[in-house]
Image: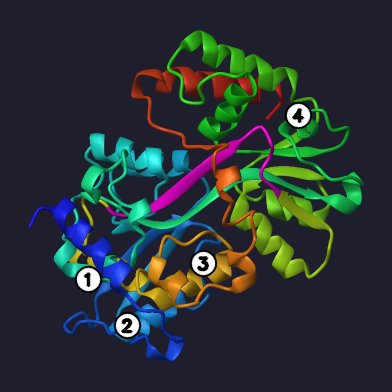
Amino acid sequence: MHKLAFLFIAALLIAALPAAAEDELEPWVCPEGFEGQTLSVYNWSTYIAEDTVANFEAACGVTVIYDVYESNEALLARIRQGNPGYDVAVPTDYVVSIMIDEGLVQPLDFSLIPNIVHLDEDFLDTPFDPGNEHSLPYLWGTIGIGYNITRVGAEITTWEEMFTYDGPVAWLEDLRGMIGIALNQLGLDPNTSDPDEIAQARDFLIANGSNVVVIAADDGQALLERGEVHMAVEYSGDIFQLIDDCECDDFVYVIPEEGAIVWVDNLVILTGARNPTLAHIFLDYLMHPQVAADIANYTAYGSPNQTAIELGLIDPDLLADPGIYPSPEVEERLFYIVDVPEAEVFYNNAWDEIKVLLGQ
């Protein structure tokens, strides 16, 4: 069966699923024959529920080696040198297309991933991986501003307010994300391949970076918590995790009015994986509605698992939060970063210059 046809059938199955109580959902059962095997996973930090891996190990009788990275650039740099033995990784949308083009990921076998039927069709058959030949969605969210409203003393609603804030700010170590935000502020295409426009974005960030005390490697929430910065450009879920852990009213996450980046992180099986069959089983496990809901509830990121949402497994407070599941009006202001290989060197050079001139 052609994979696009498979996805179409999966979408029909999702639509046919009735609303049901949590106790009507059958628990995930590991296929037999994997006892004693090992799986190696390479994922973002703070990006899975506390018991997700342990439950998989117990269900299958396997051992999971779990390593983390802090940026897509770190993932690419590690895998481009030659896969040291990882089976599963979780690249962001535009990075999936890079990894496909460079032969760093292998095609998926849908016969080993029956829980694909639970995914929202809006997250399938994407431009960065038509037909989902090599990837399946894991979690999604936005890049916005997390801030300490007690320290700032006012509500922040725009990027302009962050760039002009008279206090310590952290930017995110995400070169396409930060340059994309600058391009959007300038009214330019966030995915431009024009070196002159990329240079304009570089100059904008340099001119508006006087309040930046650190370009943070995906730990802006920790800097906020410690009071080292008052604002941080961060991934949405990281700030919502801080808000939940704090149990206070100090921290806020906002999608700025000018627009923001929306992204989807995806599960892939790497070329050179030592246990690709068990990797497929792990992907199937992660797409079970209860497992997916547990991950989304713990990380406070958006879930692409439609069944988990329809069965009421997602925390209602998270589902109702427009910072996690934006309204249609806000969605219109969101934009994706896409791969522009012909301009990769211009983006990389611009980011290096930004960091040098800002003393980072």
Q: Which residue bears the numbered disc 1?
A: 114
Determine whether label 2 and label 4 are within 8 Å by CB: no
Q: Residues within 10 Å of mark 1 (few under 14, many from 20)?
A: some
Q: Which residue bears the numbered disc 2?
A: 28
Rendered image quadrant of residue 162: top right
- Which segment did they paint magenta? 254-269
Q: Quick check: is 56 in the magenta stretch?
A: no
Rendered image quadrant of residue 29: bottom left
Determine whether label 3 and label 1 are within 8 Å by CB: no
User: Which element carries disc 2, helix, strand or loop?
Assistant: loop
Q: How is the image coloured?
A: rainbow
- The CA distance from mark 1 to mark 2 is 11 Å
- The CA distance from mark 3 to mark 1 is 20 Å
Q: Residue at x 55, y 48 (%)?
A: 328
- Residue 213 vertical placement versus 18 (above, below): above
* Amino acid at circle 3: Ala
Spot the residue most to the bottom: 23
Closer to the chain start, of discs 4 and 3, is 4
- The CA distance from mark 4 to mark 1 is 46 Å
Could you say where residue 56 lies in the image, as x and y percent from the top left?
Answer: 36, 79
